Amino acid sequence: MTGAPVLEVRNLSAHIATARGTVHAVDDVSLTIDGGEASGIVGESGSGKSVLAKSIMGLLPPNSARSGELTFRGRDLLSLSKKDQLEIWGNQIAMVFQDPGRSLNPVVRVERQLTEGMRRHLGLGRSEARARALTLLQEVGVPDPERRLRNYPHEMSGGMRQRVMIAIALACEPELLIADEPTTALDVTIQRQILDLLRRVQRERNMSMILISHDLAVVAGRTDRVSVMYAGRLAEVGATHDVFDAPRHRYTQALLAATPTIDHPRHSPLRVIPGALPDPTALPTGCRFAPRCDHAHDDCRTTGPELADVGTGHTAACLHPIGETAATTVTSGR
């Protein structure tokens, strides 16, 4: 069950200045995350998913600029002072990063990394924070938590490090958890365990979650809503089962068709999306997917489509959205 909006993103843009020109990584994105909702963001690598997450968290590099509105529980995040932002990051909004091996401090023991936020934001003493750290490690499935608290990150496997990252993110009971490609570099069995863990703790805590992935199967059975990104913009947004069972944007349909399934004919080539993402410093006029779309019309190349209703709670940025009979279905494989 979902509640009132926790996060409202309105016309958010994030541009990064480079030697080649300005990268339009996120361009005029609007979305809402409700209380207790699990929302997925999917798209090819380079579509702007991670930059969107870092824009929300205020983690963009110095050569970047944000514009638009970011409202968390009625507070405008873009207008807050650095001090006020630090009271929100890690406390009310937390993030699980792609690579725990690079995100965890290699020269600091797990106990300190896990208790630091609790002591700062919750005001816990050392013994209280340590006791809570043990409970958190047990909750996320870390065996022998007493010993693991004394470990350095390099003394644990990749899957174990990611569980520690999740424990750190959950330490201060955040209202919103952002998981950015949380299973990168993990083997398939561990990937499923981590994804199921995230979904379980999200439900148990009635916490809002944004799950970011390039793999549609990852979000298929673990989110309530999904947003499909392409070249910095939203292509389609709706309830996960609606978008996957009846995609209305050609890009979403192409992503689904390119997803391997267990009943795919043996020795037959996998379907691919021709071409590549456009240069983010020189984006095409009109629909950004038009150069790769087999069904593009002349107006697609000149008119940039906006998100429009194509069903109850279902929107697509397409001038010629596909009919429901053209749907392709994918099931969660992880």
Image (cartoon, helix red, strand yellow):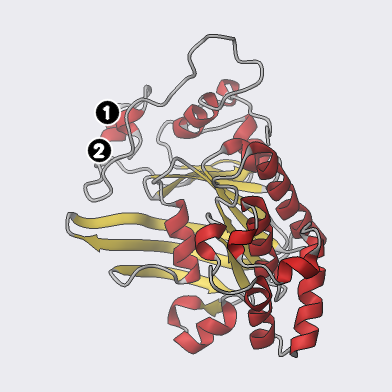
Pointer 1 residue = 298
Which residue lies at the image location 18% right of the left edge and 56% below the top edge?
A: 21
From the top left corner, tell me how far across and down residue 195 is, in percent.
Answer: 69, 48
The residue where tag 2 is placed is 302
**In the rendered view, does 184 fall on the left or right side of 29?**
right
**Marks 1 and 2 in Cβ contact (< 8 Å):** yes
At label 2, counting other C-alpha atoms closer than 10 Å, the crowd grade (few under 14, some 14-19, many 20 or more) is few
Figure quadrant of the N terminus: bottom right
In the image, residue 90 lies at what x, y percent? 60, 75
| Helix, strand or loop under label 1 | helix
Q: Residue at x 46, y 64 (%)?
A: 54
The answer to whether residue 60 is left or right of residue 149 is left
Image location (x, y in percent) of residue 81: 45, 87
Residue type of the residue flagged with mark 1: Asp
Which amino acid type is marked by label 2? Thr
123 lies above or below 110 = below
